[in-house]
Amino acid sequence: MLDHLARLNGKLVSSIGDPETVARIAQYEMAFRMQTSVPELTDLGKESKATLERYGPDVQKPGSFAHSAILTRRLIERGVRVVQILHRGWDQHGNLPKEIKNQCLDVDQPTAALIRDLKERGMLKDTVVVFGGEFGRTAYCQGKLTKENYGRDHHPRNFCMWMAGGGTKGGTVVGQTDDYGYNVVEDGVHVHDFHATILHLLGLEHERLTFYHNGLERRLTDVAGEVIEGVLA
């Protein structure tokens, strides 16, 4: 069916030279290659025992963070330019002692394994790893404070994210909060600054990604955003 469709589209291109049809043919071919490559991509049979153990006990469990982490490395090896792993369930307004431990067990070992794996294979220098969420949590308790059960509320005033590889400077910290972790007191990084820095690491000048809208020259970093020079290697 796909071969017949390609021939029909090819006839249309030959007769009228329609560029949209050319693009459609290329898209169909790319979609086919993507689908047929999945079985090989997801087959961990050729991974060494040491590599699998590095990612942790859930590495062969589809849908787990560990499984997603090793697939991330395999995707990058095959030329995929952007990979995102989602890990939900961090909204611990209660039962935090138990739940945060489980979350850390999910992500800590596989994340470290991914970075080591990328570095050992010579890919970390060309790969920007970003780990973060959309807001922080209060440093103080929400609800009853007992040894077994307490929680933390949403906190938009400050939170931490980290990056590795791709031209970043390891061991560097930018920004500081007060003693209570409540407000930023030094070198605060706005989300637009963070985006500008990621774009810079990817080789894009964020100030050139500009379009005119409602009387302003807008861009992905709004009308603000500065590259954080301190995190660049």
Image (cartoon, helix red, strand yellow):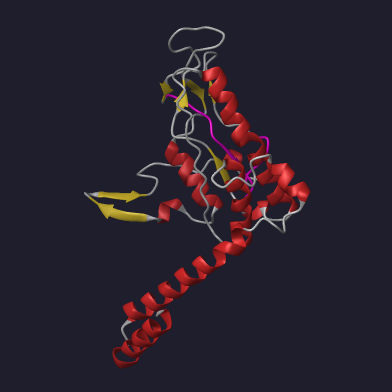
Query: Magenta segment: does it hold 162?
Result: yes
**Residue 16 % position (x, y):** 29, 89
Q: Residue at the location (57% across, 31% down)? A: 174
Location of residue 106 with respect to 79 vertically, above or below: above
Quarter of the figure with the C terminus:
top right
**Residue 23 % position (x, y):** 38, 76
**Residue 67 % position (x, y):** 60, 46
Q: Residue furthest bottom?
A: 15
Q: Residue 61 or 231: which is nearer the viewer?
A: 61
Q: Residue at the location (30% across, 92% down)? A: 15
Residue 161 in view here: yes
Location of residue 186 with respect to 70 vertically, above or below: above
Q: Which residues are magenta?
A: 157-171
Residue 79 in view here: no
**Residue 70 % position (x, y):** 63, 49
Q: Main secondary structure of the magenta part?
A: loop
Q: Residue 15 or 215: which is nearer the viewer?
A: 15
Location of residue 16 with respect to 199 vertically, above or below: below
Answer left or right for 216 relative to 187. left
